[in-house]
Image (tube, coloured by chain):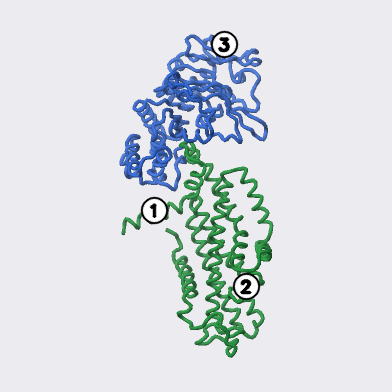
């Protein structure tokens, strides 16, 4: 095992590849994905539905069952390879070193147990705290995630809480063992706008207090703008662009990223005008094109794009990577 | 908590009355279920022998009481054994796919036989005594419980909180027994009450056919069998055991039905509501 101090990154993912065996054959929703997350850093992973975001998260957590799926590549957390651990060791790590919060807080809690019991459960799994200490920790965790009347909430059942409250509880469970990395899979998608903002602020606060790294998986660019330092854009299971958040919004280089940014509704837009859209949809996983995966929807695609798949290459500084033959061409798309 | 309270209480009362009468029969009658009295054979019901006597002069009230005791014990034992086994098989099948393929084919095989025939076959091989009857009936009813539990557990298994628990690092065993199990308690309760009453009925049928509880131990089925020979001269010998079966099964079925109605609004509803009710009670008390 490498000394953690030699490893500059908290999490490093190298050439992650996930395949599923389906009745129609093997599909590969995540292809050769590499990225890293620093300590104290929030990384955004964005992309539309079906581009492999959630599968990436599940692979990081070790949630994919080996019977139906195959995960290749390296997952290195604090200098230690997680992908080579036995499933039992991996399981004892998850929840302690890596924690995850999910998209739908309404179904993420067991309906038959109280909130307090379920937060205690993660303490029971990873600590040797006594019952009374666990109770106290539960109250302080609930306070930490901004729940009023924590004692009453602890004895309530999940259905007595609103979606926002339940997501706070999920965050309390996730941070209960002070993990070094938190994976948030669309943490605000199921919540309404004001609650979204509160939850995002909460995540930011927690990151500041505990200095953990966060991976936020989302399709919402406003979430990225609000929280992330760096962004990975996924398309059809591949990284198409990776850069810091300012560059992403100001100088996007991949046509897909540009199209995503152009599709945002903005305040200065003409009323009732049609939003820009990306025509077509993500290619099916069992029918990926030979060339660039985005070529079929790209307004600037050339024959080269259709025939040859572009590699991910560095652009400008050492922090901007793009998977496009024409990334230097910065003319406006369309 | 449950709507239709009066019906539930009435039939609950009937069941309690039957149970009390059968278990405390010695308080009401001085006779013994096994002592023969040839002088008073086949007497119709009167003040001394409430249900009359049988062809050996044994008091029928006491024999029916003992038979109800035997039937209830067989039913309860079958419900418990089949309930536990079915729950375990169902949960494991829902969780482990490869196991599911094997165990569910075994269940299909058991299902393929009519339950009574299967029970007769098993008792025939093992020999007729109460323990073997319990074993045979348990084996017959495990598949139906296992299937219902498996179905309910598979629904729960796909819920997000199971994946969230895995992400927290909970082991399969812990998820199955601590988190999955309470979510399938409602269908389990319904199934177990159903098996309880059906097992009593099937035991009666087995005994009537002569491959159940062996004489001289009275059971509701073999009392009917003894009465069949003299049904035109001594109606009481079939009437009272028959009434006992009808009331017992009706009471158990209606109670089971009402429990199911109470459980129906949602898989999770019953345990939550029971807990809530208990908590309220505790606060009031």
Rendered shade, chain A: blue
Q: Is residue B22 left or right of residue B112?
A: left
Say if residue A278 shows up in the picture: no
> On the image, which quarter does residue A187 sit in?
top left
| Viewport quadrant of the C terminus of chain A | top right
Which residue bears the numbered disc 3? Answer: A326
Q: Which mark is residue A311?
A: none
Q: Residues within 10 Å of mark 1 (few under 14, many from 20)?
A: some
User: Residue A254, position in %: x, y?
Assistant: 53, 16
* In-front residue for pair A141/B280: A141
Which residue bears the numbered disc 1? Answer: B276
Task: Identify the secondary structure beneath mark 2.
Answer: loop
Q: Nearer the viewer, mark 1 or mark 2?
A: 2
User: Residue A95, position in %: x, y?
Assistant: 44, 34
Q: Badges 2 and 3: C-beta atoms under 8 Å apart? A: no
Say if residue A9 shows up in the picture: yes
The chain containing the residue under callout 2 comes to: B
Same chain for labels 1 and 3? Say yes or no: no
Q: Nearer the viewer, mark 1 or mark 3?
A: 1
User: Residue A1, position in %: x, y?
Assistant: 48, 24
User: Residue A126, position in %: x, y?
Assistant: 42, 37
Q: Which chain is green?
A: B
Q: Label 2 vs label 3: CA separation?
A: 90 Å
Q: Which mark is residue B214?
A: 2
Identify the mark nearer the N-term, 1 or 2.
2
Task: Identify the secondary structure beneath mark 1.
Answer: helix
Q: Which residue is depicted at the point 52% across and 55% down?
A: B188
Q: Nearer the viewer, mark 2 or mark 3?
A: 2
* In-front residue for pair B227/B81: B81
Same chain for labels 2 and 3? Say yes or no: no
């Amino acid at each position: 095992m490498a000394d953690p101090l030699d490893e500059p990154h908290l999490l490093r993912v190298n050439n992650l590849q996930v395949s599923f065996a389906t009745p129609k054959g093997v599909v590969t929703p995540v292809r050769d994905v590499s990225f890293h997350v620093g300590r104290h850093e929030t990384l955004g992973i964005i992309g539309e539905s079906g581009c492999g975001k959630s599968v990436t998260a599940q692979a990081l957590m070790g949630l994919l069952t080996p019977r139906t799926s195959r995960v290749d590549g390296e997952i290195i957390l604090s200098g230690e390879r997680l992908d080579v651990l036995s499933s039992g060791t991996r399981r004892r790590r998850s929840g302690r070193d890596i924690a995850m919060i999910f998209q739908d807080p309404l179904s993420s809690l067991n309906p038959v147990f109280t909130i307090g019991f379920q937060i205690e459960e993660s303490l029971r799994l990873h600590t040797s705290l006594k019952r009374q200490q666990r109770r106290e920790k539960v109250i302080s965790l609930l306070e930490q995630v901004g729940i009023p009347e924590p004692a009453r909430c602890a004895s309530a059942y999940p259905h007595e809480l609103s979606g926002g409250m339940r997501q706070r509880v999920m965050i309390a469970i996730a941070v209960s063992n002070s993990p070094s990395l938190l994976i948030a899979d669309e943490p605000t998608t199921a919540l309404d706008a004001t609650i979204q903002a509160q939850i995002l602020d909460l995540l930011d606060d927690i990151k500041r207090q505990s200095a953990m790294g966060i991976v936020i998986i989302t399709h919402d660019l406003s979430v990225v703008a609000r929280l992330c330092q760096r962004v990975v854009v996924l398309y059809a299971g591949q990284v198409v662009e990776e850069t810091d958040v300012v560059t992403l919004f100001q100088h996007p280089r991949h046509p897909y990223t540009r199209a995503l940014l152009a599709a945002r509704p903005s305040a200065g837009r003409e009323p009732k005008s049609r939003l820009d859209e990306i025509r077509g949809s993500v290619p099916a996983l069992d029918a990926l094109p030979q060339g660039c995966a985005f070529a079929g929807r790209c307004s600037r695609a050339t024959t080269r794009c259709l025939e040859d798949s572009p590699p991910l290459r560095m652009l400008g500084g050492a922090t901007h990577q793009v998977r496009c033959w024409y990334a230097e061409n910065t003319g406006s798309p369309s | 908590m449950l709507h239709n309270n009066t019906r539930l209480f009435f039939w609950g009362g009937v069941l309690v009355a039957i149970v009390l009468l059968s278990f405390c029969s010695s308080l009401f009658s001085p006779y013994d279920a096994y002592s023969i009295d040839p002088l008073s054979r086949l007497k119709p019901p009167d003040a001394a022998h409430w249900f009359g006597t049988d062809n050996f002069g044994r008091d029928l009230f006491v024999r029916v009481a003992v038979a109800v005791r035997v039937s209830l014990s067989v039913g309860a034992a079958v419900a418990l054994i089949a309930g536990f086994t079915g729950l375990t098989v169902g949960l494991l099948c829902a969780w482990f796919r490869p196991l599911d393929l094997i165990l569910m084919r075994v269940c299909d095989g058991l299902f393929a036989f009519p339950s009574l025939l299967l029970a007769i076959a098993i008792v025939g091989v093992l020999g007729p005594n109460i323990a073997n009857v319990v074993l045979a009936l348990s084996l017959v009813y495990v598949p139906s419980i296992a299937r219902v539990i498996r179905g309910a557990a598979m629904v729960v298994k796909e819920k997000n909180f199971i994946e969230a628990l895995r992400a927290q690092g909970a082991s399969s065993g812990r998820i199955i027994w601590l988190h999955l199990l309470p979510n399938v308690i409602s269908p389990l309760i319904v199934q177990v009450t159903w098996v309880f009453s059906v097992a009593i009925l099937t035991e009666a049928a087995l005994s009537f056919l002569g491959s159940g509880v062996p004489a001289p131990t009275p059971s509701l089925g073999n009392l009917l069998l003894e009465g069949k020979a003299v049904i035109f001269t001594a109606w009481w010998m079939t009437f009272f055991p028959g009434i006992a079966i009808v009331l017992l099964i009706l009471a158990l079925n209606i109670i089971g039905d009402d429990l199911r109605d109470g459980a129906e609004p949602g898989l999770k509803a019953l345990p939550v509501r029971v807990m809530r009710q208990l908590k309220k009670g505790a606060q009031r008390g």
